């Protein structure tokens, strides 16, 4: 996380907006590298930074309590020389007309001037029309959301409908099933996870859920939510509890009149700079990944952690007259559903060539490679970490698809 040493010339004050994973990593980096700079973190949620992946897994199942998902223990958190303002949102940003950084307007009516700003406001769940009027319809993004779903599920025995078979929807479905509920998943596309994995692999994941007794229905359109469930085009599905998992939108609304370029995220350069002295990190940042020659916005844990630290390092280095570093990673994510471990390295698109290079879908353990324009583009593993992780180096070297297949054939 910490790159480079303490710097001589540093801004007087740096503000971090968003107090979650990317914001925490930025704040930690700043407090270590520029001890004479005042670091202020603005966080809309009332909570200290916590980890989101368990929200749909062990926290939702009741196996873990909220204390277990804190990103840092209270003692090391209190040691950071950082001012935390929880329960306060940034409502507007005026970038500095000359110089760097800008002025933040906050929801408590105050303003904050900062020479450097790291924006790490993440993303918010998309909602269906009218869903806020129904108490039994939930989304899952925050600790409070997860605790509300957990309370609603209670001791199980309920009919739960999950709308949207993305990663979060499928994880919630798996957890709800493990808690002895009757679970139906509704997906508009012909298979789950098409955008992330393509049809064949998405179908393999759907089959795992079906084998555990979940009713996974693809190619269905939800017409409306009702007091008692979900209206589909040809039937009404009764549900005690509905979870809407239809993706997220980057949390940029508060930046609408900031002059920053916003296009499904905050548009940054290769070093994550959006404007002089203003950087973005995590789920909210869109940047050109030089390794893949592709602009991307990534909604996964590893990316948020790495970008938070890198944005802070680059902000400090540029202010000190040093050259900032481009961010060119191999994107990575994991997902746990039932006892299955899903891992993906790189990128995929629905028209990629997909070949199962090791293991098989039938045995429930395999590595699939994704190729585009003759090059290896992604690697997807089900219960196969020993096959997936060596592919990171192959993706970093941007090897040809054929060389990647030959490499996998040589793996033990
Ligand atoms: C249920 C769930 C399960 C997940 N599971 C996995 C997984 O298994 N594997 C994986 O790789 N990834 C997973 N992820 C994704 C991962 O958690 C995210 O990529 C990561 O949390 C992004 O971190 P972030 O700091 O960029 O944004 P966030 O974690 O979204 O945090 C942004 C913070 O900024 C705050 N904020 C927003 N607007 C403002 C404002 N105007 N002013 C001040 N504060 C503001 C928000 O309240 C929030 O606290 C999961 C996510 C969820 C929700």
Image (cartoon, grey):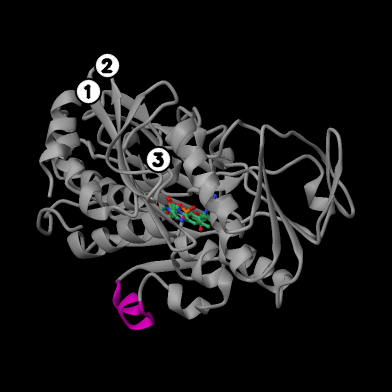
401 with respect to 234 (left or right): left
Q: Are marks 3 and 1 in contact (CB under 8 Å)?
A: no
Q: Which residues are magenta?
A: 73-80
Name the mark nearer the viewer: 3 or 1. Answer: 1
Task: Say which quarter of the image contains residue 214.
Answer: bottom right
Foreground residue, 379 or 22?
379
Q: Earlier along the polypeptide chain: callout 3 or callout 1? A: 3
Question: In the image, is residue 74 part of the stretch drawn in magenta?
Answer: yes
Measuring from the top left, give residue 24's x and y in whole percent.
36, 61
Q: SS at mark 3?
A: loop
| Residue under label 1 | 375
Eyeballing the image, is 177 above or below 276?
Answer: below
Residue behind label 1 places its C-beta within 8 angstroms of ligand 1 = no
Residue behind label 3 places its C-beta within 8 angstroms of ligand 1 = yes
Q: SS at mark 2?
A: loop
Question: In the image, is residue 412 part of the stretch drawn in magenta?
Answer: no
| Residue under label 3 | 298
Eyeballing the image, is 126 above or below 156?
Answer: above
Quadrant in which the N terminus is drawn: bottom left
Q: Earlier along the polypeptide chain: callout 3 or callout 2? A: 3
Measuring from the top left, give residue 63's x and y in whole percent.
52, 78
| Residue under label 2 | 373
Residue 400 makes an appearance in the image: no
């Amino acid at each position: 996380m910490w790159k480079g040493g303490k710097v001589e010339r540093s801004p007087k004050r740096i503000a971090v907006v968003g107090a979650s994973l990317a914001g925490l990593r930025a704040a930690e980096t700043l407090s270590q590298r520029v001890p004479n700079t005042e670091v202020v973190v603005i966080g809309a949620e009332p909570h200290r930074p916590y980890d989101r992946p368990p929200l749909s897994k062990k926290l939702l199942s009741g196996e873990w309590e909220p204390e277990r998902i804190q990103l840092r223990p209270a003692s090391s958190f209190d040691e950071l020389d950082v001012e935390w303002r929880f329960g306060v949102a940034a409502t507007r940003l005026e970038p500095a007309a000359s110089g760097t950084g800008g002025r933040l307007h906050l929801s408590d009516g105050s303003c904050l001037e900062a020479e450097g700003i790291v924006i790490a406001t993440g993303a918010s769940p998309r909602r269906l029309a009218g869903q806020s009027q129904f108490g039994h319809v939930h989304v899952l993004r925050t600790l409070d959301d997860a605790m509300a779903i957990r309370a609603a599920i209670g001791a199980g025995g309920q009919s739960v409908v999950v709308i949207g078979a993305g990663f979060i929807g499928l994880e919630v479905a798996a957890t709800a099933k493990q808690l002895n509920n009757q679970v139906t998943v509704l997906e508009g596309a012909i298979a789950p996870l098409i955008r992330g994995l393509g049809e064949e692999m998405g179908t393999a994941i759907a089959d795992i859920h079906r084998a555990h007794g979940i009713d996974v229905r693809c190619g269905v359109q939800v017409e409306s939510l009702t007091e008692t469930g979900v209206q589909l085009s040809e039937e009404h599905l009764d549900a005690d509890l509905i979870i809407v998992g239809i993706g997220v939108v980057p949390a940029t609304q508060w930046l609408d009149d900031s002059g920053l370029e916003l296009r499904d995220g905050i548009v940054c350069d290769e070093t994550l700079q959006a404007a002089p002295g203003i950087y973005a990190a995590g789920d909210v940042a869109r940047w050109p990944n030089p390794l893949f020659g592709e602009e991307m916005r990534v909604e996964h844990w590893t990316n948020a952690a790495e970008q938070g630290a890198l944005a802070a390092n680059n902000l400090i280095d540029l202010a000190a007259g040093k050259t900032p570093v481009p961010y060119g990673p191999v994107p990575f994510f994991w997902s746990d559903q039932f006892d299955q471990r899903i891992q993906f390295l790189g990128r995929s698109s629905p028209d990629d060539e997909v070949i199962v290079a090791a293991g098989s879908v039938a045995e429930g353990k395999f590595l699939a490679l994704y190729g585009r324009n003759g090059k290896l583009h992604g690697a997807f593993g089900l219960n196969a970490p020993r096959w997936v992780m060596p592919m990171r180096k192959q993706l970093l070297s941007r090897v040809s698809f054929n060389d990647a297949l030959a490499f996998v054939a040589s793996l033990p």
